[in-house]
Amino acid sequence: MSKIAWLSGVGNSKKHQEIIADLLYAFIKKAKTVKKYSKFKALPEIVLDSKVPDIVVYNFSRNTYTPVAIFEICYSVSLNDDLAKCQKLMSNDSNIKEAFVIDISNDTLVFNRLYRLKNGNISKPKKSSEFETMNLDLSDII
């Protein structure tokens, strides 16, 4: 696979963009229809600490956006880079409680979840599609 296939933004595949759209729709719909989640805002391609995750979920309160979850959609060729990117972003911002790197290389998607441990450290990647922040199973969405 050429490097152009996993560049950010307009260089991505239709499959990559479709997954971002499906996730955004599900996150926004839940935030608009379930009062408990109304404070969450999901936005694509926002710069965080000079990095640009595919999706950032924010807790929006008092005109302040606080990132609480990040998502990367990737092909296996960039999986380790995207995991490292998410680990760095979580290390730099203790408000980020969860990160997902979703490998779309095959017909079966692979969900890699990082999360904040009780001691504040970051977990090792786990195979899980459970997005606890918004109480959603990502495998039910995509």
Image: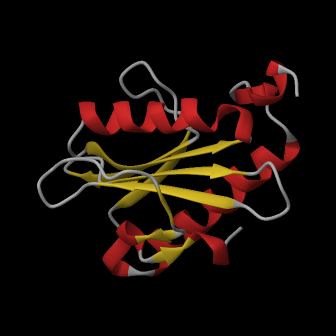
Quadrant including the N terminus? top right
Say left or right for 52 vs 115: right
Residue 134, by quadrant, is bottom left
Residue visible at 38% across and 71% down in the picture: 132
Residue visible at 77% across and 45% down in the picture: 16
Specify the farthest residue to the left: 119
Residue 30, given in percent of the width and then of the height, sits at 50, 74
Residue 42, given in percent of the width and then of the height, sits at 49, 53
Residue visible at 35% across and 33% down in the picture: 89
Numbered label tally: 0
Say left or right for 5 vs 114: right
Residue 111, given in percent of the width and then of the height, sits at 59, 60
Residue visible at 52% across and 28% down in the picture: 52
Q: How is the image coloured?
A: secondary structure
Q: Nearer the viewer, residue 61 or 100?
A: 100
Residue 84, given in percent of the width and then of the height, sits at 46, 32
Residue 136 vertical placement versus 51 (above, below): below
Q: Nearer the viewer, residue 74 or 10?
A: 74
Q: Nearer the viewer, residue 94 or 119?
A: 119
Residue 13, by quadrant, is top right
Residue 74, by quadrant, is top right
Say left or right for 101 vs 58: right
Quadrant including the C terminus? bottom right
